[in-house]
């Protein structure tokens, strides 16, 4: 488990650079369109209250990190 936010940010930046380097605008647009189509196929609606969907995950994260429950 990575405990340092700075190390996690560096890892994420390195991953993005290595995975996306050389990608053209057209390829990036195709990737976005594919992800959007997948979201629609899964029934994701951008107007849904996505923050409410995160509440159970956030509660577990707070418990695992010994933080108090949300008020």
Image (tube, rainbow, N blue to C red):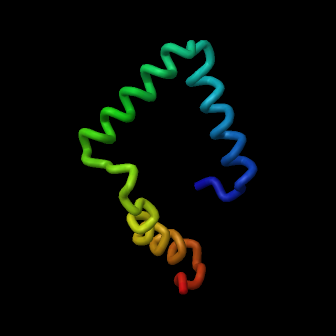
- In the rendered image, the quadrant that contains the N terminus is bottom right
Would you identify the image quadrant in which residue 30 lies?
top left
Q: Is residue 69 above or below residue 51?
A: below
- The foreground one among 44 and 8 is 44
The residue drawn where x is 71% and y is 55% is: 5
| Quarter of the figure with residue 20 | top right
At 63% from the left edge and 53% from the top edge, which residue is drawn?
Answer: 2
Q: Is 39 situated left or right of 54 in this image? A: left
Instruction: Report the front residue among 69 and 10.
Output: 69
* x then y, percent, for residue 45: 33, 50
Residue 6 position in % (x across, y down)? 75, 50
Between 26 and 65, which is closer to the camera in this rendering? Answer: 26
Horizontal and vertical percent position of residue 69: 53, 84
Is residue 9 left or right of 39 when viewed as pictured?
right
Place of residue 36 in the rendered image (x, y in percent of width and height, measured from the top left):
37, 35
Q: At 56% from the left edge and 13% from the top edge, which residue is drawn?
A: 24
Quarter of the image that includes the C terminus? bottom right
Asked if residue 9 is positioned above or below residue 27 in the image, the reply reads below
Q: Nearer the viewer, residue 65 or 59?
A: 59
What is the residue that sits farthest to the right in this orientation? 6
**How many marks on residues?**
0
């Amino acid at each position: 488990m990575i405990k340092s936010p700075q190390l996690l940010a560096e890892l994420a930046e390195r991953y993005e650079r290595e995975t996306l380097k050389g990608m053209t605008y057209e390829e990036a647009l195709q990737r976005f369109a594919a992800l959007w189509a997948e979201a629609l196929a899964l029934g994701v609606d951008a107007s849904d209250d996505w923050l409410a969907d995160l509440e159970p995950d956030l509660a577990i994260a707070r418990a695992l990190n010994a933080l108090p429950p949300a008020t």
